[in-house]
Image (cartoon, grey):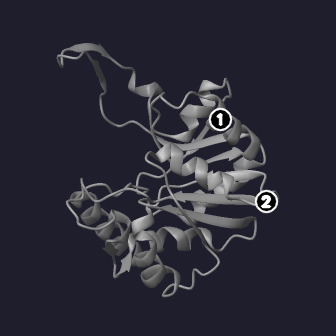
Amino acid sequence: MNIGVVIPAAGSGKRMKSDINKQFLLLDGSPILAHTISKFKQYKKIAEIVTVLRMEDFSYFQNNILNKYKCEDIKVIAGGKTRRESVYAGILSFSPAIDYVIIHDGARPLVSKNLIIRVIEAMEKFPAITTGVPAKDTIKYIDKDLFVKETLNRDKLYYIQTPQAFRYDILKNAHEKVKAEINITDDASLVEMMGQKVKIIDGDYENIKITTPIDLKMAEFLLSEGKE
């Protein structure tokens, strides 16, 4: 099993109210993206790691992450206008040796070693995997005027996370066959549209995505708790 990891990090800092890419904000003294990359560098089965950035972020990434955190072996490519375009560019950049792909958000720096190991182990059994945690809140389906149409059964709902993992050919085929105008928020949705079953394995409630300032504060707290 030769695994390639795509880390999409071509977002902006709009919801973070930041002038720089949110993945470059500091978490415990290091850029968020540096934390994320470091989590995947230690596994022998992971042969290649590619980070997908906006072109204007290349110089900052080179100076503040690649050189400083010994990430010279990380491939860096330009992303597209959407997350889907960026992930597709990432998977196309792999060498022919790669037969499995892990997708992980650059803004999820608290992914644990145990979770990555669970994903790698599950890849030996299932061709399409996502991580997730059971929904703890009541979730309601609404209409365009914000009236409740239905209260969904929480016992059958999961908050979906990354890492997500796929056999390379399945993921590439889904990116190429599902119409570009169809809006999707994760790669699991793409392969689902191709009729592929996706296995959910237990994620981690602490594996948060840093999108807003409160998320960054929460990540700082969780990181400090882990150190203690």
In the figure, residue 171 lies in which quadrant? Answer: top right
Is disc 2 placed on a helix, strand or loop? loop
- Cα separation between marks 2 and 1: 22 Å
Query: Residue 192 in the image: x percent, y percent?
Result: 61, 28
Residue mark closest to the camera, 2 vs 1: 1
Q: Please tell me which residue is depicted at 48% across the width and 27% down the height of the picture.
A: 182
Q: Residue 2 carries which label?
A: 2
Q: In which quarter of the image is residue 224?
A: bottom left
Observer-nearest of 209 and 125 = 209
When the figure is inspected, residue 14 is found, relative to residue 67, above or below; the finding is: above
Q: In which quarter of the image is the N terminus?
A: bottom right
> What residue is drawn where x is 73% and y is 40%?
127
Does residue 213 appear left or right of residue 31 in this picture? left
Vertical relation: 160 (above or below) 223: above
Mark nearer the N terminus (2 vs 1):
2
Secondary element type, mark 1:
helix
Type of amino acid under label 1: Glu
**Residue density around tag 1, few if under 14, some if 14–19, many if 20 or more, within 10 Å:** few
Please rate how many residues cluster around mark 2, counting C-alpha atoms within 10 Å: few if below 14, some from 14 to 19, many from 20: some
Above or below, comparing residue 111 to residue 26 in the picture: above
